[in-house]
Amino acid sequence: MARATPETHREILAAAARRFAVTGYRGTSLQDIAREVGCSKATVLYHFASKDALLCELMAPAIAMLEALDARIAGHTGTDAQRVAAEGFVDLAVRFRREIALLRGEFPDLLQQPAFTHIQQISERLVAAFTGHSDRPAARIAALVVLAGIAETCGEFLDIPAQELRPALLAVAHRALEPTT
């Protein structure tokens, strides 16, 4: 008896996430994913037009949350922008830490893919919000260190409960970011 299409679709996504986490996006082939699911490569291609399409669907919820954060920070300046950006990014990173973990080390290359090019502009606006829209080099350095540190920490500490990780990350972010006044 054949498996239901939605179930197969979910199994392919789950297998892709596991494979990307183990061998990276570039190191994973559609055949690897098919083998893990126990189906043919043609079945994977029936559900997803390409490996890029598979990655896009895996990342869609995180990207939607990032886009919503981008919209939220647009109306804020100074310390308020820092707070909204820090809380929003920490929430995103904690919620999607498995996705962050599976893309570690490959994020700059992935930003070059057409489906993810807008993420670069969002990232730049996020950095600006983390600086409180300051043009001081020290503020930008702090913002980049905090952003990268949050992402790296979330990808590394998958076993720490969210209710413990979130306040720890926010405390570090608030200490590290330059005041805008």
Image (spheres, helix red, strand yellow):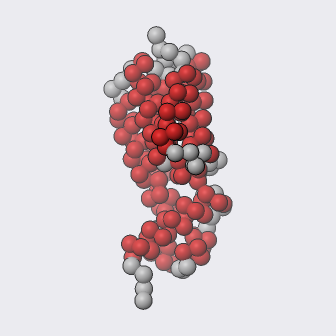
Q: Which residue is drawn at 46% across and 36% down?
A: 89
Q: Residue at x 40, y 44 (%)?
A: 65
Q: In what quadrant of the picture does the N terminus appear?
A: bottom left
Q: Nearer the viewer, residue 147 or 112?
A: 147
Instruction: Decide: is 150 above or below 181.
Output: below
Is 143 on the left-hand or right-hand side of 57?
Answer: right
Location of residue 136 in the rendering, given as x and y in whole percent from the top left corner: 55, 15
Q: Is residue 117 visible?
A: no
Q: Which of 76 and 116 is in front in this view?
A: 76
Q: Which residue lies furthest to the top in this view?
A: 181
Location of residue 6 in the rendering, given as x and y in whole percent from the top left corner: 38, 72
Is 132 on the left-hand or right-hand side of 147?
Answer: left
Q: Residue at x 46, y 46 (%)?
A: 95
Instruction: Decide: is 18 above or below 75.
Output: below
Q: Residue at x 33, y 26 (%)?
A: 75
Q: Is residue 64 visible?
A: yes
Location of residue 73 in the rendering, given as x and y in whole percent from the top left corner: 38, 30
Q: Residue furthest bottom?
A: 1
Count of marks placed on residues:
0
Q: Which of 141 and 161 is in front in this view?
A: 161
